[in-house]
Image (cartoon, grey):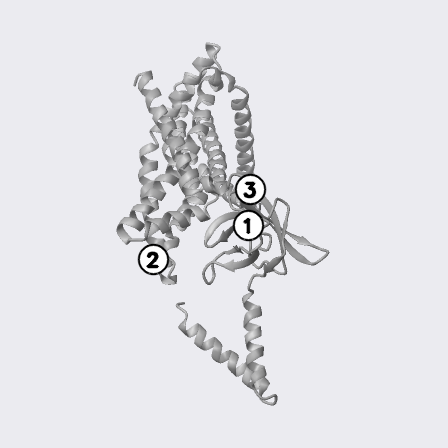
Amino acid sequence: MANIFAKLVRGLRMTGHRVVEQLWRLGAGARLFFLTISYSGESFRRPRLIVREMYFTGVMSLIIILVSAFFVGMVLALQGYNTLQKYGSSESIGVLVALALVRELGPVVTALLFAGRAGTAITAEIGLMKATEQLSAMEMMAVNPISRVIAPRFWAGVFSMPILACLFSMVGILGGHLVAVAQIGVDVGAFWSQMQANVDFTDIVNMLIKSLVFGVACTIIALFEGYDSPPTAEGVSHATTRTVVTSSLAVLGLDFILTSFMLIT
Amino acid sequence: MDRSTIDLWVGVLVALGVAAFFGLAMKVGNLTSSNLGETYTVTAAFENVGGLKPRAPIKSAGVVVGRVDGISFDSKNFTAVATLKIDKRYPFPTDTFANIYTAGLLGEQYIGLEAGGEDAVLKNGDKITQTQDAIVLEKMISKFLFSKASEETPTQAGASATEDTSKAKSTELGDAPF
């Protein structure tokens, strides 16, 4: 009896510990976010710092984003056509592909790929910088690591995400166009005119807002996990894994919240 | 990787992004034709606007000549008042007839304008007096059923009406593609 009671107490204690730990991490992440914003001045005075990081986060993610966008668009067109032609409205395939990409898949899949491609790189880089005491060395030389290392990466991620999401949507629509028009034989005029009649400019603005929010979330999570990782090989590897898991969950959760706001108005 | 190469690639990324954004805005989102340029505004009162929505097209002879700016409810006459923005290039006579049509069987609703014979044209703030309401499918079906029922002799009316309903239902649904 006493044994069971002790086990129960230990279980409760573990749960409480985990909850407090997560809350602590959330608070530390939020503090890093505000520190990054307040130390951003240097990055904007020296835009070359941001441009350099945009090369590593944005340009290097270009291939994976474009190729997956193309295939996502093609699959959407195939699946959409298969169902729509049962109802005799296969011309609406353009609307389906465009709305699905612009409203949801564009920002969300881009953010997931971005977290996997750029977020992990950021976490591993900063985690290793910390493990090899480069960040401490900077502090010793009176260089603030947040303004020199964290902030440029943050802004590069925030600027890259909307660009990548726009490219994802556009390339996806072109992929859908390839399958629907060239392979299946849907009328080109119907494809584009129905799309233009049903996609609003507000949809595109909403896509930009979504991708901007996802960019902020993914980048700050990647930066925080790297900055907070234990300075060991194992610590960095765990931090990299956590970046992908946390970013993906954050993106999907934020997507639900943002979509529900956008559909109300 | 030297600095100029990095700058070049980031430049390419930004240029591609801007191009994709403009492609989305112009080619997909149809930003270009949603603003009509110079317009004049007229109102039209309808007993029932059905599923008409703001930004729905206004067509005359099949050509889009304007867009519905807004729909409000007039609590004095208990009618719906649609505000129509029509392109300045297309003047319409004062006795123009405004109908609410449906594109296809289940498509979106739009306003069709049929020009009358007057010489005077509609000006900004004018009101179109001759309107026809949206066709509400339920009303049409119930009208049809009542007219069917009244054709029968009064004693059988109740029974045959229900019979007719089921018959009409079965044939209509049987032929439908879904």
Query: Residue A176 vs residue A105: left or right?
Result: left
Residue A108 or B140: which is nearer the viewer? B140
Mark 1 falls within which chain? B
Q: Are marks 1 and 3 in contact (CB under 8 Å)?
A: no
x, y percent for residue A121: 37, 29
Residue at 56% from the left image edge and 65% from the top image edge: B136
Residue A192 or A26: which is nearer the viewer? A192
Mark 3 falls within which chain? B
Residue A3 appears in view: no
Residue at 48% from the left image edge and 31% from the top image edge: A216
x, y percent for residue B174: 41, 74
Binning the other alpha carbons within 10 Å of mark 1 as few (below 14), some (14 to 19) or many (20 upward) gives many
Instruction: Please tell me whether mark 1 or mark 3 is closer to you in this view.
Output: 1
Binning the other alpha carbons within 10 Å of mark 3 as few (below 14), some (14 to 19) or many (20 upward) gives some
Q: Which of the 4 image quarters holds residue B49? A: bottom right
Residue A157 appears in view: yes
Q: Which residue is mark 2?
A: A82
- Is disc 1 in the same subunit as disc 2? no
x, y percent for residue A41: 51, 17
Distance CA(mark 1)–CA(mark 3): 13 Å
Kindly identify the amino acid type of the residue bearing the numbered disc 3: Thr
Q: Which residue is mark 3?
A: B39
Mark found first going from the N terminus, 1 or 3? 3
x, y percent for residue A21: 53, 34
Distance CA(mark 1)–CA(mark 2): 45 Å
Residue B6 or B138: which is nearer the viewer? B138
**For residue B92, which numbered disc appears in the image?**
1
Name the residue furthest top.
Answer: A141
